[in-house]
């Protein structure tokens, strides 16, 4: 009986120690699992991100046409804006799933590096959401301007360029912030 007690005590002590060994169960194992799951979800949107980049190039061509006074029909920009909204919705839906995974890390104990990673990943997603929101608003304004032009309103290219510049500045700022955060995430990931 005494021997059984000693064995049970040893098992309890050893299992308690395993929680503190990195990578052996406990919250660190859960944190790594949630991080990898979130990262995998984010990686799955690469094809849509590529489509979004191609669409951005097409939109740039249309915007350039406006400034060379070869003003495209509003339907062309509206079609691009609708495609953008479709891609944005899909990407943000996936980002929401990844955010859920990263957020699970924040409730764990003893995983500060993982919490830092999760907080940064969620922050980067919020930055990208802001960037996408600004792109959507810019396209709405372009479509509206083109529709007004088609109804006979004069197009003030200087005012139009100034409004676009405001969007471009904010989009560039958000893009740089997102890239900086991506670099920080990559560095943190090397440590984990």
Image: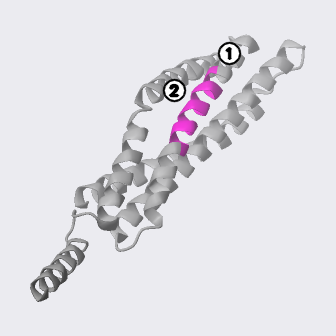
Please state the horizontal and vertical placement of residue 159, each as a whole percent of the image: 77, 34
Query: Residue tagged by mark 2?
Result: 52
Main secondary structure type of the part rendered in magenta: helix
Please state the horizontal and vertical placement of residue 161, each as a whole percent of the image: 69, 33
Name the residue at the front extreme: 1
The quarter holding residue 72 reads top right
Q: In this image, 117 relative to 127: left or right?
A: left
Q: Nearer the viewer, residue 143 or 106?
A: 106
Q: CA distance from mark 1 to mark 2?
A: 13 Å
Task: Classify 10 Å Cα crowding around label 1: few (below 14), some (14-19), many (20 and above).
Answer: few
Q: Could you tell me which residue is drawn at 63 percent across and 35 percent down?
A: 135
Instruction: Decide: is 7 above or below 182.
Output: below
Range of residues picked out in magenta: 83-96
Instruction: Decide: is 114 above or below 145.
Output: below
Quarter of the rendering occupied by the N terminus:
bottom left
Q: Nearer the viewer, residue 59 or 47?
A: 47
The quarter holding residue 29 reads bottom left
Q: Nearer the viewer, residue 52 or 14?
A: 14
Name the residue at the left extreme: 3
- Residue 177 visible from this viewpoint: no
């Amino acid at each position: 009986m005494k021997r059984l007690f000693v064995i049970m005590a040893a098992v309890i002590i050893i299992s308690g120690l395993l929680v503190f060994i990195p990578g052996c169960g406990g919250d660190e194992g859960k944190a790594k699992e949630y991080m990898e799951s979130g990262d995998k979800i984010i990686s799955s949107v690469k094809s849509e991100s590529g489509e979004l980049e191609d669409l951005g190039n097409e939109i740039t061509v249309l915007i350039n046409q406006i400034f060379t006074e070869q003003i495209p029909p509003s339907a062309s920009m509206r079609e691009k804006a609708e495609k953008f909204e479709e891609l944005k919705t899909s990407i943000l839906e996936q980002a929401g799933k990844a955010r859920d995974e990263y957020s699970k890390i924040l409730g764990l104990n003893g995983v500060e590096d993982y919490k830092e990673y999760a907080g940064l990943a969620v922050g980067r997603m919020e930055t990208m959401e802001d960037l996408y929101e600004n792109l959507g608003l810019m396209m709405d304004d372009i479509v509206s301007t083109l529709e007004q032009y088609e109804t006979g309103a004069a197009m003030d290219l200087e005012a139009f360029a100034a409004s676009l510049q405001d969007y471009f500045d904010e989009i560039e700022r958000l893009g740089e912030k997102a890239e900086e955060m991506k670099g920080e995430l990559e560095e943190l990931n090397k440590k984990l």
